[in-house]
Image (cartoon, rainbow, N blue to C red):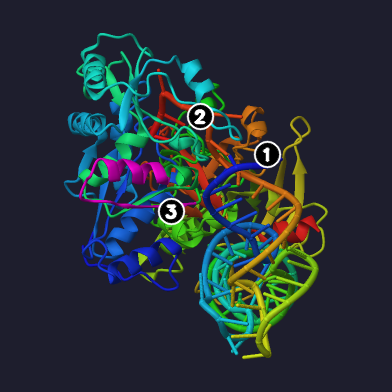
Amino acid sequence: MSTEPLKPHSPVDFIRATVLADQETQRFDQRVHTRFPPEPNGHLHIGHAKSICLNFGIAKEFGGLCNLRLDDTNPTKEHMDYVQSIQEDVRWLGFDWGDRLYYASDYFESLYAFALTLIRKGKAYVDNLTAEELREYRGTLTEVGKESPHRNRSSEENLDLFSRMRAGEFTEGAYVLRAKIDMAAPNINMRDPALYRIRYVTHYRTGTAWCIYPTYDFAHPLSDALEGVTHSLCTLEFEDHRPLYDWVLRECEVSCHSQQLEFARLNLAHTVMSKRKLLQLVEEGQVQGWDDPRMPTIKGLQRRGYTPAAIRNFCERVGVAKRDSVIEMGLLEHAIREDLNHSAPRVMAVLHPLKVIIENFPEGQAEEVEAVNNPEDASQGTRPLMFSREIYIEQDDFRENPPKKFFRLSLGQEVRLRYAYIIRCNGVEKDEQTGAITLRCTYDPDTKRGGPQAGRKVKGTVHWVSASYALPIEIRLYEPLLMDSSDSSDEQSQNAQLQLNPRSLEILSSCWAEPSLRHATVGSRFQFERQGYFCVDPDSDDQKLVFNQTVSLRDTWAKIEKK
RNA sequence: UGGGGGAUCGUCUAAUGGUAGGACGUCAGAUUCUGGUUCUGAUUGUGGGGGUUCAACUCCUCCUCCCCCAGCCA
């Protein structure tokens, strides 16, 4: 990736506008330094992608830097596996943090020193109220809190107690270090918030070196300061933490005071975004795992066939603002179609096979026809395809009783086989037992590409595969995970059971593809002509290739037929 | 009804006192050996009431609705 700054395109969002203004006023000596700070307690999802694109994007556009920081201050749910996964995903999305991979846990010693400073200044104290008492003392949204009886301990006593907290002399929850701010503050975050708590939990990096851990509110601003971050971008729910963020930096007297800016998190219709609900889907077995192609995780999108460029493009189109919003799936789908339309090689595959016998084509013979690999990109060339007496077409491409405007095959009608001949349907054979049908057709030998009647027009063109050369494949079709439109985080829907879409996965195990696909590698993407974009799934083996439908092609016929 | 945010086409998002624009979607047409792509056109919006102003999405005021906060989570 080039380090050349790309100037932000105008019009610019409110965050970029702020960065621009700060640069003009020399607020941070013209420096621009951001960070992407996930907690390693889960896999990244498309919502994180928005933040990643924002943070890394701004750094790049303004000639600044963006750090990757693992915000690992709560050892209970964090794992090295997630750290690994996060790095893979950020890199996969196309971003580079250089040598600036940081961990909040690397700052534990510094953070402890800052806490001592606060205690000495009389700005923090050790409290031994129980969690329940603490809640009572905090007051409510409409009632002020009251001061803890331990609020005015001497610095000496606090220092002693705090060092003993660190030394492991107390049980979990017995003591906590609190900021001394204002128990009557209308902003509850300012009512003497906890800065350190005792946790006898092995931290995935620091092991048992610590039994006290800083809270987000204490660690985050200082981590930003320690890294020289100028613009600390986070989501809206941290808006009323900003006064505390600023308080910590002010009272700790650090030289670098980053500007926190809050933007609306990404919500996608018909899916969930919270780690809790995502985890629930995995644990309940509603999906195969974190990388299930239906999941909005980066791993899931990757397996589904999404490209980094499409996701970046999507994030750019979504924009950055403060208003709560729910983005339609259509925008994501547009982004991937746009990308794959230019890059993905075309190939023919039949999802729901219908056997067609070309009666005037000699038995046991085959003929080569030439197919274009990508009409959008001539450099992708052509490939040979085998045409034979027995072929498969899509069941949807034949109707015994065709509706009006049906341009496909029906009794007595003609259709073009893509890259091959025009055929006419002369008869339909029904199997008595199975009810399966076979079409009896004849082809017009003059209508091949380059043939004398090549230009003959028929209403429809249909994709096909040769029955004798076809490759059996499995195809997995996907629909949105949820019936309802969005991941709402209000109390009601948080407790409500997710309304899962029972048809989110459909497996088609008897599909046929042209043989050129035989050696397709896992992860490679294709357009199955007239169907959609598909990607080879890791479940594939030597026996059978498995394809995930990334997204269907736009289907105007489906819309017409609905009417 | 404490505090903090927010409300602009169906969905996102611009316009900081001066023509409400773009994208996605939708609808129509053209092109097309993909009912794909591409192209052309159309479509629809400032939450409500007052006020200031030559001029208001924008400023003032009242109202309505939505989101966030009472973890020793982030």
Give the Cα distance between marks 2 and 3. 23 Å
**Is residue A463 among the parts visible in the rendering?**
yes
Seen from the viewer's position, the closer of residues A216 and A195 is: A195
Q: Is residue A150 above or below residue A533?
A: above
Asked which secondary structure carries label 2, the reply is: helix
Q: Is residue B44 left or right of residue A391?
A: right
Asked which secondary structure carries label 3, the reply is: helix
Q: Residue at x 23, y 17 (%)?
A: A166
Seen from the viewer's position, the closer of residues A431 and A215 is: A215
Pointers 3 and 1 in contact (C-beta within 8 Å): no
Give the Cα distance between marks 3 and 1. 23 Å
| x and y percentages locating residue A303 in the rendered image | 43, 41
From the image, state whether disc 2 or disc 3 is nearer to you. Answer: 2
Instruction: Find the magenta span and give its range.
Output: A242-263
Q: Is residue A57 above or below residue A138?
A: below
**Is residue A499 among the parts visible in the rendering?**
no
The residue that disc 1 covers is: A483
N-term mark: 1 or 2: 2
* Residue A519 located within the stretch drawn in magenta: no
Residue kind at label 1, given as amino acid type: Met
Query: Is label 1 on the same chain as label 2?
Result: yes
The residue that disc 3 covers is: A311
Q: Determine crowd level at label 1: few under 14, some 14-19, many 20+ residues with C-alpha closer than 10 A.
A: some
| x and y percentages locating residue A333 in the rendered image | 54, 54
Asked which secondary structure carries label 1, the reply is: loop
Residue kind at label 2, given as amino acid type: Arg
Name the quarter where the C terminus of chain A is drawn: bottom right
